[in-house]
Amino acid sequence: MAAQTPEIRASQDVTRSRSIEASTGPAIKLSAQDLSVFYGKFQALKGVCMDIPERQITALIGPSGCGKSTFLRCLNRMNDVLDGVRVEGQLLMDGVNIYDRRVDAVELRKRVGMVFQQPNPFPMSIFDNIAYGPRLHGERNRSRLAEIVENTLRGAALWDEVKDKLHQSAFSLSGGQQQRLCIARVMAVQPEVILMDEPCSALDPNATFRIEELMTQLKQDYTVIIVTHNMYQAARVSQKTGFFLLGDLIEFDETARIFEAPSDKRTEDYVQGRFG
Amino acid sequence: MISNGNGLPIRSEYREKLARLREMVLEMATFVDGMLSRGMEALQQNNSDLAEEVRLSDDVSDALNYGIEELAINLLALQQPMARDLREITAAIRIATDLERIGDYSKDIAKVARRLRGEPLYWPLEDIPEMARLVATMLRKAISAFVDRDAEAARGLAHDDEAVDVIFKRVTEQLMDHMREDPRYVFQATHLLFVARYLERIGDHTVNVGERVVYMETGRLTPEG
């Protein structure tokens, strides 16, 4: 079987190059280690292990109730506020377990910001929405605040649209603009990680593409993790994709791999739209 | 919503279109397989009517190719296929292109048959029909692999092609010897050399088809991958 020899050699080469890539690739920002979540007796997340790379977009996909939002909410300990929730295993951020008692959840949420499905600007001006976080964290200098607001709105690709109406209510903005304002509000406290839970599901296609464009820019400075029901969005914006099913992380790989040639039959069935 | 046993939606219209795409590839393969065998028949039996018929049928092969491309683009644009479905659709486009080339070469063989009409063959055709038999077998094997989703069988085509190349080399040398022997043989020998070359290329295109089947089944684009 001489014809098979080169193929065997090639597959060994692939293994070798992958391990090299693993040692020189992007740093791991967050690492879930055998992470389980229980809502009372119900186990919503079953021993998930996942290394989330720094300054990339990681997408979490899967049918409703698969555990992807539960996982996302573990990353800034949002689950803590719910009664009867128990978290097991470890979740390391830069190597430190964020579920360690010594870690302050409020401080953690400053480092790990979150954007929700429905844009939820505060009932105040555009300016004050952005200045809210920095003020909360002690910034009082007016010109410094103005600078933060401008830089943040520029960073969120919203400045040109709102610079002449900074003191109008945030509710005067369109849905897509409100969502970008919410992303900017998260950015204003200079987090390291931005979590997004279905950030575009309430938006029209145009506003969706603007948010996706913004996400692509965000990854230069932030680690972004997005939960989305729209797997085409996951395919468009993310570098890594994790597929969850019934609380298990079924497959986690390069996004192109997940959508072109996934390893697991269940992933394949899901991305081919055979269930959802 | 209609669903399968797991309570999963079946996307019936999408599934039907994908099945139709597969059928169209099979249909086109069968058609060009027929063009090849009739082209060879026209050559061996000195039948210029049959040759003309093959020449004209190339339009049908082209139309089948466009039909496959059109349906594939429609599926890509409207159904956002992913994973194996995506690979199957892109493979179908590529396979149709290879089949279209095989149709073209079969037409070219028929054209040679017309050129050589009325002229008795100086030598018994042995190696060239043998090449044709081998590449036709390869084509059927490639298409069976596509239909049966058999990457292993598809991989074997590269090996089969080596036998075709060996005969091609031998035929080339023999025909050049004939040309050196007597300039009167040049016209016929040159045209038979063309035929051998067309068959050799058909072999290469069936290997391409096999590679697309391997990609479709494994996600690996290169034979080494």
Image (cartoon, coloured by chain):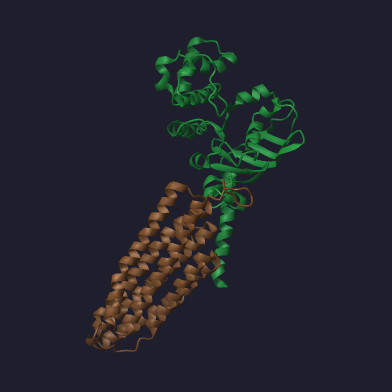
Decide which of B73, B134 is in the foreground and name it. B73
**Residue projecting furthest to the left:** B184
Q: Residue at 33% x, 63% y: name it.
A: B62
Q: Quadrant of residue A69?
A: top right
Q: Say if residue A264 shows up in the picture.
A: no
Q: Say if residue A201 shows up in the picture.
A: yes
The image quadrant where one finds the N terminus of chain A is bottom right
Decide which of A19, B39 is in the foreground and name it. B39
Decide which of A218, A67 is in the foreground and name it. A67
Seen in the picture, residue A250 relative to B32 is either above or below; the reply is above
Q: Residue at 30% x, 82% y: name it.
A: B176
> Which chain is depicted green?
A
Seen in the picture, residue B54 relative to A190 is either above or below; the reply is below
Seen in the picture, residue A176 relative to B61 is either above or below; the reply is above
**Residue projecting furthest to the front:** B2
Viewed as shown, does residue B189 lie left or right of A236?
Answer: left
Viewed as shown, does residue B20 lie left or right of A66?
Answer: left
The x and y percentages for residue B155 are 51, 67
The x and y percentages for residue B211 are 47, 63
Q: Quadrant of residue B91?
A: bottom left
The x and y percentages for residue B113 are 28, 80
**Residue projecting furthest to the right:** A41
The image quadrant where one finds the C terminus of chain A is top right
Decide which of B126, A39 is in the foreground and name it. A39
The x and y percentages for residue B31 are 39, 70
> Which chain is depicted brown?
B
Q: Residue at 62% x, 50% y: name it.
A: A266
Q: How many marks?
A: 0
